Amino acid sequence: MQLNALPPVPGLSRRSFLKTTALAAAARSLSPRGWAQVPGANGDIRVAIAGLNSRGRLLVEDFKKVPGVRVAALCDVDTAVLARASRDYSIPDTAVDFRDLLARPDIDAVAMATPNHWHALQAIWACQAGKDIYLEKPVSHDIWEGRQMNAAIEKYGRIAQAGTQARSSPCIREAVAWVRAGNLGRITAARGMCFKRRVSIGLTAGPQAVPDTVNYELWLGPAPLAPPRRRHFHYDWHWFWDTGNGDIGNVGLHQTDVARWFLGEKDIAPRTIVVGGRLGHVDDAQTPNTLAVVHDYPSAPLIFEVRGLPTRAGANEMDTYQGMAIGNVVYCEGGTLTVPVSYTSVQAHDNSGRLVKEFKGDANHAANFIDAVRSRRTSDLHIPVAESHVSSCLAHVSNISYLLGKATAPGELRQRIQGRPALSEAVGRMLEHLAVNNVDLGKTPLTLGYPLETDPAQQRFIGNDAANALLTREHRKPYLIPALA
């Protein structure tokens, strides 16, 4: 597909969409209860799901398990993906353009598992159209977008759940309450890790062809109009700044959120610094595959680590920490808790290593969303989008620290971080990990991120114009995000 021969956008025009959402907002304002009809009050709640590769398909399955819910429509800009999901789940009602879903009065809620760069705008559009929203992580592609999305949720009175499903795990909820009650003493640190193998995406000789089944103009949406530089069109967009946020804003966001949950911190950390790089691969990807981050909270540090390389060169298995490749460790004065990525168990050990308590249990996160849609109480949500926005911001702040950082030789790096014990410990293990993967840091040095100071209430950086310039990006017309906050 040539960029100068893009297919027309099917369904609603932008003018028709804006007219529809304006009418919806007017109808809401005339009703003393907000909306005249509570979704599902007299029947099934009808959910449409957009974005049908990996995570979107799991959402179809999760919502299908919830009593009183009907997955009424599917949406994807790739007609091959859309047709396959329609066939597999016996859901014939489909759309390529997300706005077609929003114009329909028979859709009560939309669940979005689309690429990161679409999240905030689609959520705002859904709010304007009077739909409740279930939004996958990260809930925004940058901090400014997230703020506008939160303002839209508030303005239009929508129920908005984030897809960080650990928050619905009964065992983690119980463990958080148990630890916060002081049963292991004061929390001294919370660590998350995402050690997940990410192979090289390869080098391309130039712009790559877009699959014939993809409406690329719609796929790009707010992102710059440019051809892809990746052989695998789907998923590898995570590793490019225009569309993704790297693994710290991908799989890793779950563990960041769990760590912050245990700490009980409600805002962005006042200080953040990272060390990392894209190492071990020579390819077109942009985001780092190796990171150590410290968010210096008043209560205790939140430490996060990303590794995309295996245990050693040529191996397939990944490193583990406290027996986990992906998960959390919460350190307390009297012991530690481990939270595996399954979210179905938590173990508490004392300082001698003795198991003192184990928490078990599982739940359907989608069911919690539906409960809140029926009750119309945001307080019923286990993690409103506004709460997940803070965890998304931690990923964005980390990436900004990295982007403003400088390549630093190993000796100088050790010297410059020696006054930061949490970061020094994580980087020390990182250096060992890179050495056994035959990474020559003389040729491809690590980046020492810029130490950022943040005003948590304003979600801006203190005295740093370069960092504040990265709070958002330029959005492509006509996919502009309204300034609401």
Image (cartoon, helix red, strand yellow):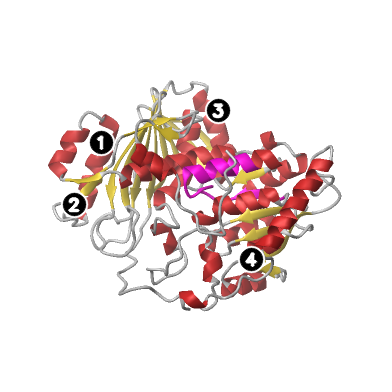
Where on the picture, by quarter, is residue 9?
bottom right
Q: Residue at x 23, y 60 (%)?
A: 313
Q: Which residue is drawn at 45% across and 69% down?
A: 233
Q: Is mark 3 on a helix, strand or loop?
A: helix
Three-letter residue code for mark 4: Asp
Residue toward you, 288 or 431: 288
Three-letter residue code for mark 2: Ala
Q: Is mark 4 on a helix, strand or loop?
A: loop
Q: Give the range drawn in magenta.
A: 131-152
Report how far apart the C-alphas of labels 1 and 3 lie in the structure.
29 Å
> How crowded is the residue under tag 4: few (<14 C-alpha within 10 Å), some, or many (20+)?
many
Report how far apart the C-alphas of labels 4 and 3 lie in the structure.
43 Å
Q: What element carries label 1?
A: helix
Above or below 266: residue 250 = below
Three-letter residue code for mark 1: Glu
Evaluate whether residue 67 shows in this view. no
Report how far apart the C-alphas of labels 2 and 3 lie in the structure.
40 Å
Residue hosting label 1: 425
Three-letter residue code for mark 3: Ala
Q: Position of residue 185 (x, y in %)?
A: 43, 20
Where on the picture, by quarter, is residue 317?
bottom left
For marks 2 and 1, the one nearer the N-term is 1
Q: Is residue 147 magenta?
A: yes
For marks 4 and 3, the one nearer the N-term is 4
For marks 4 and 1, the one nearer the N-term is 4
Q: In this view, does 406 lie to the left or right of 262?
A: left
Residue hosting label 3: 177
Report how far apart the C-alphas of labels 2 and 4 lie in the structure.
47 Å
Query: What number is the disc on residue 435?
Result: 2
Residue hosting label 4: 97
Report how far apart the C-alphas of labels 4 and 1 lie in the structure.
48 Å
